[in-house]
Image (tube, rainbow, N blue to C red):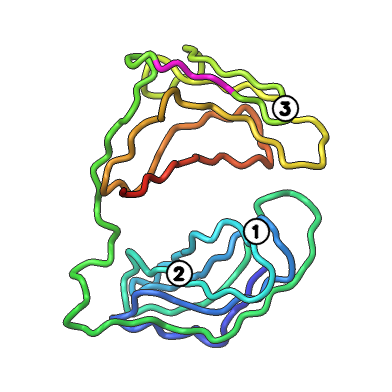
Amino acid sequence: MYAVFNGEGYTLPENAIRVGFWVYNDHENSNWLRIEVQDSQNKTQRLGDITKMDWIGWRYVEIPLNGISLPAKLTRIYLVQVNPVEEAGEIFIDDLSIITVERNKMPASTEIPGVETVVATGFETDAVDFTSFPSWVPASAAIVSDYKNTGTSSVRLDYVFKAAPETQAAYIVLPGNGISVPDGAETIGLWAYSQKTTKSWLRAEVLMQTAR
């Protein structure tokens, strides 16, 4: 579903860094909210990391213009349906804003800076003892050699979700206090192999430690 702007769209000046607007959502859903931009090279770019409309009512959102060649045109705001289910609803969009900065404070590049990637755990060398806790669902986890990616082994999680009114979850739990996440870490990444398309979510749990 698209909201298409008249003409060539809204101008994004050379010092633009984000697009912001208020969104009214009438029910929680799994649709993605994104924007479409025509950059200065006349290339179509699609942006946005809002991968779940998990609110009801009004919410202000901002979408960064990282990596976009400016000046550009904002041409569309749109929803992407990711689950093949029948669904109907409506959203309202208000107070569209173009966030800019002073030219002398603009970075030389709006590309996302590279970060150091550190492999925290290699299953084939660290011999991590994984366990699984069922949550309303039978589950088991084991280190195996099938479906490996870059290493020589992988961790397989077997689960069976049954009909239940509650949200169900199957866990792979790291032993002890888990893997330490150092200061300055920006993302947690992993390779995942799925045997079929499902509506399940893949998430990570992090325990934040407060200074005493």
Q: Which image quarter: residue 165?
A: top right
Question: Between marks 1 and 2, how big is the CA–CA gap?
Answer: 16 Å
Residue 31: which disc?
Answer: 1
Mark 1 or mark 2: name the one nearer the start of the chain: 1
Residue 137: which disc?
Answer: 3
Task: Residue at 26% x, 49% y: name it.
Answer: 184
Vertical placement of residue 119 versus 1, above or below = above
Position of the N terminus, as image quadrant, is bottom right
- The crowd level at tag 2 (other Cα within 10 Å; few <14, some 14-19, many 20+) is some
For the record, the magenta segment spans 128-132
Nearer to the camera, 169 or 78: 169
Residue 108, image x, y percentages = 18, 69
* Badge 3 amino acid: Val
Is residue 118 a member of the stretch shown in magenta?
Answer: no
Question: Between marks 3 and 2, how big is the CA–CA gap?
Answer: 37 Å
Mark 3 or mark 2: name the one nearer the start of the chain: 2
Nearer to the camera, 198 or 40: 198
* Badge 1 amino acid: Asn
Residue 40, image x, y percentages = 34, 75
Q: Secondary structure at mark 2?
A: strand
Task: Residue at 28% x, 41% y: name it.
Answer: 182
The dominant secondary structure in magenta is loop
Task: Residue at 50% x, 31% y: name it.
Answer: 192
Residue 156, image x, y percentages = 54, 20
Circle 2 sits on which residue? 63
